Image (tube, helix red, strand yellow):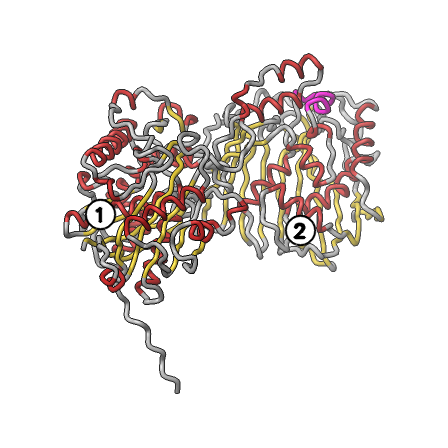
Amino acid sequence: MTAQSETPAIRQAVIIGGNRIPFARSNGAYANASNQDMFTAAIDGLVARFGLQGQRLGAVAGGAVLKHSKDFNLVRECVLGSSLSPETPAYDVQMACATGMEAIGSLANKIKLGQIDSAIGGGVDTTSDAPIAVSEPLRLMLLELTRARSTGAKLKAMSKFRPSFLAPNAPGTGEPRTGLSMGNHQALTTKAWNITREAQDELALASHKNLAAAYDRHFFDDLITPFAGVSRDTNLRGDSTIEKLASLKPAFGKNLGEDATMTAGNSTPLTDGASVVLLGSEDYAMANDLPMLANFVDFEAAAVDFVHGAEGLLMAPAYAVARMLKRNNLTLQDFDYYEIHEAFAGTVLSTLAAWEDAEFCKNKLGLDAPLGAIDRSKLNVNGSSLAAGHPFAATGGRIVATLAKMLHEKGSGRGLISVCAAGGQGVVAILEAR
Amino acid sequence: MRATLDLGAAPSLGSLYAKGLGAGVKGWLPGRKSPQLVLPDVEHRVTALRPERDSLVAYQRLMGDTVREELPSVLVHGLAFPVAMSVMVRDDFPLPLLGMVHLSNAVEHLRPISPDATLDVSAHAENLREHRVGTQLDIVSEVREEGELIWRGTSTYLARGVWLGQKQASGAAVREPFVAPTRTGSWGLDAGTGRAYAAVMGDYNPIHLSALSAKALGMKRAIAHGMYLAGRALAGAAPHGAGYTWSVEFATPVFLPSSVDVAFTDSGNGTEFSGWGARSGKPHFTGVVTAL
């Protein structure tokens, strides 16, 4: 009989620190930056901060949602262009907006298993340097031209051309199987949970105020490296007001008429940016005299059937959190901070409403009692995606680094992360202060 | 006992349409009552039909379905359609093809059908009956593999203004006002939707091809082919690796280009689907797919 091989003891995976470049609104400051440029900049900033020059790390993992085919080995190319040792292995991950979380969580698992001692995980996205599609007005003009029978009608169609038609089309966030944009999907969920316009605008305003306050107290000084002349997230509107937000017209779910509540103000804009997180074993951190901000305790993915309307597109994290809490023998109230990615204000509020709803928790989550309400003063306390912007794959790294630093500053407690993603998916995680 | 007419090879749809349209000009006028409104008691048959792999892939791409080793039900319908059409253009077929309205389909797709299958197709007309605005009938197509019935489809058509007996005195339809359900998806159908379907299925019916060709036949614009709409719905709802039944009813035509909101709802072992105009709010179709 063969003896069973010994499984290495599970050890802690710690978050040492993070780095990102400021996030910039699409077609703005980073219009000429590629995913490779931005992710390399994020890695190099991290390398400089923690003195990793020439080091061979266990692995670098990350990815981008919108990727050129030439970027088939994006993360490895970034490593080769960085000041890390060229002997550092790297690989791409792709899980829509949960790319960063999946990359970081999987690396934490490798560290816990003793397979690697150190790693960088993160993500990057650009909607400015995306593969160009014909703009919608140009498409419509060409269609009209096709339908036009006479020379006069053709000329009339062509006369509608404007130079702005040549601007690259913002990449769609449409779900391939439903044809609905992410915003129009969320509009269905927002309505189903009776989330008001006012509640969404308040959440958006809080995000801007909290992010601005965090910058003011220099919270991000050791989390951000300036890039392309930008040192703050360009979407941040610290001086926004509830009146300004209330004046915006609905941008999604316009077919809902009076019930259309989602605007450009309470939805995230298309954004460019990159983020990375440095993880390691305790031994690695101590041996290299590096800080230990938080333990990466656990993470969980979930997916829902949105195609036939059984669940809202962005509701998977509600399910993932229930499973992860059970596995870790925790309640929803056992956290000091909640980082719920603000894809849309409606997403956060629908998720919170679902956790408070006895019927949802019983029928959908299989729980005897609802997960309950959270202390809203612990939610996204340093701002989130509505203010910072949301370069899809880069959001996970932003949140992990921010939460790890918050927990370390507090010196105790736990934080919960929830990130929704296209395709009806989501990844959630638990961090613990050190 | 119904007679059987062996057609040899499948007739070309182009010549069938030409014949059908030609018959239309030959003297069919709305309101005319046929002296002998009787369906021909004959079954048309074509044996040893082989689906083409290229058209299978083209069909799956067109419908947004995954390329897999099963014949989609609407593609089987397309294989059988020329045989069905050949019944409808018979000289003794009592209703005019021109202007005939496609009302509904009910299909039993009894088991998965291999793309390499050799199929025998037969079709006949039956169940001539009154409709509020004219006369309707069923064209029943059956598909067999080595004698085993594997697919049976009933297509219901309406001839407006043609009456079995006395013209009905019924007034306007009593339709319940349509309330759109919560949409689960949206189909953007461009002006070329009809041409794309025609190219894949070899079914060049002028009312689907372009605004101009549709206008020639009295339509204000080209309309989406009903089987294209059914195919899209089945691509999102039909089970794989098992037999199933499905049905679809058409309410108002989808004029191209168009944005169609759709809803899919799973219930038990079936999926209900419906589509309506995103802007007009008019119902276009409803249907259901049920696994066997």
Q: Is residue B64 left or right of residue A192?
A: right
Indicate the quadrant where residue A291 lies.
Answer: bottom left
Query: Label 1: few (<14), some or many (≥20) within 10 Å?
Result: many
Question: Which quarter shows the C terminus of chain A?
Answer: bottom left
Q: CA distance from mark 2 to mark 1?
A: 64 Å
Nearer-the-camera pick, A275 or B189: A275
State the residue at coordinates (34%, 33%). A230
Q: Chain of mark 1?
A: A
Indicate the quadrant where residue A420 lies.
Answer: top left
Q: Which residue is mark 1?
A: A405
Q: Taking A282 as reference, is A103 above or below it?
A: above
Q: Taking A421 as reference, is B136 above or below it?
A: above
Q: Which residue is mark 2?
A: B151
Query: Label 2: few (<14), some or many (≥20) within 10 Å?
Result: many
Observer-side mark, 2 or 1, equals 1
Q: Taking B134 as reference, is B9 above or below it?
A: below
Q: Taking B9 as reference, is B248 above or below it?
A: above
Q: Which mark is residue B138?
A: none
State the residue at coordinates (67%, 17%). A154
Indicate the quadrant where residue A376 lies.
Answer: top left
Residue A408: percent from the left, percent from the top?
18, 50
- Give amino acid for label 2: Trp
Residue B276: percent from the left, percent from the top?
52, 30
Nearer-the-camera pick, B238 or B105: B238
- Give amino acid for label 1: Lys
Task: Examine the rendering and report whether any part of residue B69 can be seen.
Answer: yes
What residue range appears in magenta? B211-220
Q: Is residue B90 left or right of residue B75?
A: right
SS assignment at label 2: strand
SS assignment at label 1: helix
Say if the magenta span includes residue A127.
Answer: no
